Amino acid sequence: MHTLKYSAASFFKYLTLILGALMALIPIAVVFFASLKTNEEYASTGPLTLPENWLNFSNYTKAFVDGNMLLGFMNTMFIVLISIAGATLTGSMMAYILARFKFRGSKLLMGAFLLATLIPGVTTQVATFQIINSLELFNTRWAPILMYLGTDIIAVYIFMQFLDSISESLDESAMLDGASYWTIYWRIILPLLSPAIVTVIIVKGVNIYNDFYTPFLYMPKSSLQVVSTALFKFKGPYGSQWEVICAAIMIAIIPTLIAFVSLQKYIYNGFAQGSVK
Amino acid sequence: MPKLSNMSYKNQRILIIFLFSLVPVALLLTFSYLPVVKMFQYSFTSWNGLSKNMEYIGFDNYRTIFTKPEYFAVFKVSLYYFLATFVQMGLALYFATILSFNVRMKNWFKGILFFPTLLNGVAIGFIFLFFFKPEGTLNTLLDLAGLGAWQQKWLLNPHLINISLAFASVWRYMGMNFIIFLGAISSIGGDIYEASEIDGANRWHQFRHIIIPSIKRILQLNLILAVSGAIGVFEIPYVMTGGSNGSGTFVIQTVDVAFKYSKMGLASAMAVVLLGIVIVVTIVQRVLIKEEK
């Protein structure tokens, strides 16, 4: 009796897991199938029908060339790299002085950073747009870069949390050796922060790669398209060629898949830490 | 240039505090606080975003928002996303709990359930346009299961559109809750389960009396994020439907008013209202959580 009950529970457990996994995979899998079909094949078969030729990459070539995806990847790469480097530097510097020095106004400063997380970015776009405009940054790659640095302050938190676990006696013994504060930051703190830096790279990298709104609003110029906006452009003109849109979707997904498979462990840790402020 | 190490620690301290906070604070002020101030200022004008002079019109914009029902009707749409969040968190909690114990192919399930969260928002929008198309995945699946009569125009029927979009939103964000809950549950020591098993606790008892209490704080935090998330929904409906067929959210409406109809003043007032709601909700929740402790 006990074993029967036990195996029924076990059956239910695996059934729900498999259903959950199918629910996660089927929407992507059908897009993958469609991306490998020819135009006639797409029109005559249902979405669940497997493609006839698994090596038909013509839609991919078409999507990549017509959608100018290479440009999208280059622009995304540029923005991601500079934003991450900037967020790592400014975030760790800010976290270093907030965590290590008590000075007049340090409480206020910390409060200012905390309060800023309460302001949802989407609500202030109307005014942010005017600020970007008056800085003459509209339609430049610096607009999103500065906004990723200035509004997404998550890096400061991740570093501050991590700094709490780095003993201050390290700083003190370095000071006995006559090290300057800059040396302490650059040679001791920053290297010790590397696990937190990995978290920042992953969380920020994924967020920026996936962000659509900021580039869409601030860089409408087609030579500045990023992966998201390049993909969005397929919406109108390719309405009748879903097999090409599907290939474009896969092109945008593949880098994420590669990053996920190769960095799995860091990604899990990064998101578990990075999203709980 | 004077060498830093020759300076006294006191002077170094002042210098480094100044230099290290200069850029972060400038960025914080310019892109987090200045917009809020500006937004308040614009909200009392009839500015179109281009002309040099702004005309102050007092509370007219606010009066428009609160007296014309069409501006507030869109908050109804947020309810769909808000309710969907409970489904999302329930699923995440369920999968996180069962994957915390012994399961075959655990890492595969974990990876597959989490992966959608990492995907590009536009890609997800397109994936679900494909999913909900009249000849799309969902209707084909229903047909295959012998439920052909249940087929619907998921994105064209105004009664279903928000449910369909909220479903896509659950698909997108469930993995994030899941991985956070999984991390929280895994920090519970194994000996607690063992001790409870000796006392005759079954899985349900363990879930109810060990897992839930130890991740309560994280559950609450995620709930706070869920409310402001539901109010600020933008990407999925914007990419998929552009806000048509009654799927427009408050943010889509604000963006349209600002950038399509060039009514910066009115849009700013809408954004102020939205910001006010989000802040009130967040503060109320934080206070409630603090009181409970």
Image (spheres, coloured by chain):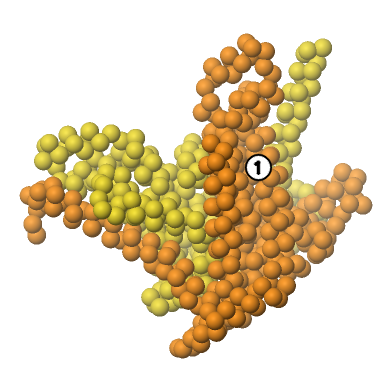
Chain colours: A yellow, B orange
Residue shown at 64% from the left, 12% from the top: B199
Residue B283 x/y as whole percent: 54, 52
Residue A66 x/y as whole percent: 58, 68
Residue shown at 28% from the left, 34% from the top: A167
Amino acid bearing label 1 = Met
Residue B31, relative to residue A155: is it above or below? below
Q: Nearer the viewer, residue A216 or B277?
A: B277
Give the chain letter at badge 1: B
Which residue is label 1 attached to? B89
For mark 1, give the secondary structure: helix
In the picture, the quarter occupied by the N terminus of chain A is: top right
Residue shown at 85% from the left, 48% from the top: B142
Residue A148, relative to residue B146: is it above or below? below
Residue B172 x/y as whole percent: 64, 50
Residue B181 x/y as whole percent: 58, 36
Q: Nearer the viewer, residue B250 or B130?
A: B250
Q: Nearer the viewer, residue B261 or B78?
A: B78
